Amino acid sequence: MSSSGGGSSGKELVEGSSSPTLSRYESQKRRDWNTFGQYLKNQRPPVPLSHCNCNHVLDFLRYLDQFGKTKVHIQGCPLRQAWGSLDALIGRLRAAYEENGGSPETNPFANGSIRVYLREVRECQAKARGIPYKKKKKVAAATTSQGSSSKGNCDDSSPSTTMHYS
């Protein structure tokens, strides 16, 4: 066994095979990259990857909500993608962008607005589950331990995460 991995991601070769087999992570990353590319092609007009920006990424994340299985709070509310799934997806797409020739400086998946969106989704979903989310930088003067009246209401989220379903 050799410890010089040459930058590979772990389980790349299958015994007795001369062709590389992708790890689960690499397979997911490739599938996610292809899905995002198809999403851009399906836009009207189609968006070339070279013109993709953080707004396209945010629209893609909102588009994915329709396939979500996470009930955000009470009965009758739409199902959405779970924060952890979105966070992992962005991590894979961020890596795939750079592996496919994109510059780290122009990576739309690394944009601050994506981090803000993910934070808002996490806060909304935590609030919906009754998990108090404490911000470290602000003093929450209006928050009380009896704040269950707003528990689970995602309508309190910022406009960037408010979903409009018709």
Image (cartoon, rainbow, N blue to C red):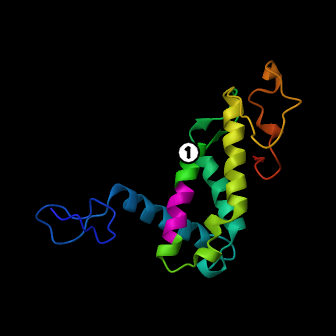
Q: Residue sitting at 81 percent across and 18 percent down?
A: 146
- Indicate left or right for 76 with 145 as reference: left
Neighbours of disc 1 within 10 Å: few (<14), some (14-19), many (20+)? few
Q: How many marks?
A: 1
**Camera-side residue of 68 and 3:** 3
Note whether 64 is above or below 45 in the view shown. above
Q: Is residue 50 above or below residue 131?
A: below
- Which secondary structure is most common in the magenta stretch? helix
Locate residue 51, reporting x and y percent.
Answer: 66, 79
Q: State the residue lying farthest toward the left.
A: 16
Which residue is disc 1 drawn over?
84
The magenta span reads 89-96
Image quarter (top left, top right, bottom left or bottom right) of the N terminus: bottom left
Q: Residue at x 81, y 27 (%)?
A: 150
Residue at 51%, 80% (x, y): give it.
Answer: 101
Picture layout, residue 101 above or below residue 134: below
> Left of 97 or right of it: where is 122?
right
x, y percent for residue 27: 38, 61
Q: Residue at x 72, y 46 (%)?
A: 120
Q: Quarter of the image holding residue 25? A: bottom left
Q: Amino acid at mark 1?
A: Gly
Q: Is residue 113 left or right of residue 104?
A: right
The secondary element bearing badge 1 is classed as: helix
